[in-house]
Image: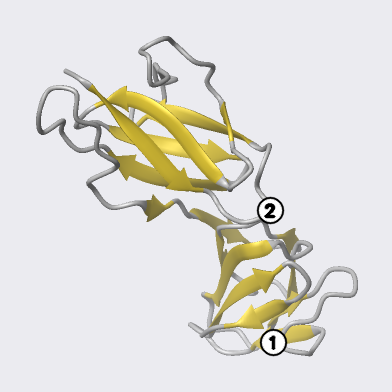
Amino acid sequence: MANVQVRVHWGPNSAGKSVQVNVHKTGAAASLFNSGGSGVANPVTVDSGGYVNFFAAEQTVYDLVEGSHGMQVTTGAVTAPGTVVTPAGPTTPLINPVSVTAAYTASDHDVVLANATSGALPVTLPTPTNGAHIMVKKTDVSANAVAVNRSGTATIDGATTVSLASQWAHTELIGDGTNWFVVT
């Protein structure tokens, strides 16, 4: 098997962050290389342009993780000796489903499944970072609301809270580095 170049845009304002690269399903740290074939450190540091760059085995699925952020990358095949290709498969954002029945502070990529049967349930958003993504859904039939609350001075579409009052009500939020915006 040959090594292929993996170049993934991790996002703005991410330079210097450490991204762990694991072999999908096993969770084992992947063996990574530079363009000359020498081993490099894992985790990988995001470059000044916001990219994660490394060489790794072709036709392999990797999980790239930094804190609660992550994605899955499938590398393609080397099409000719000496040819380098970038990821051929889908890059799938990782999500973190969390079932809660009491006050909860969400993290980026959380899908909060909130059961307010026991009483009103507050879900507090973290300080928004650019590109942060959180979903909250009320799963119970009670009359108790799930309150999605801002943190600090950030707003949610200009408001301080979003109320989910009925079963299956949900909200999906994206952060811009200053505030949260409802996208569904």
Mark 1 residue element: strand
The amino acid beneath tag 2 is Asn
- The residue drawn where x is 38% and y is 21% is 35
Q: Left or right: 99 with respect to 57?
A: right
Say if residue 120 shows up in the picture: no
Comparing 26 with 170, the one in front is 26
Label at residue 72: none
Question: Callout 1, which amino acid?
Answer: Ser
Q: Is residue 103 left or right of residue 86?
A: right
Q: Residue, x 24% and y 31% (percent of image)?
A: 60
Say which element carries label 2.
Answer: loop
Residue at the disc numbered 2: 13
Q: Name which residue lies at 64% across and 43% down.
A: 48
Choose the circle earlier in sequence order: 1 or 2: 2
Q: Where is residue 174 in the image (x, y as percent from the top left)?
A: 61, 73
**Viewer-proximal residue among 8 and 36:** 36
Residue 3 coordinates in the image, percent (x, y): 26, 22
Q: Mark 1 points at which residue?
A: 163
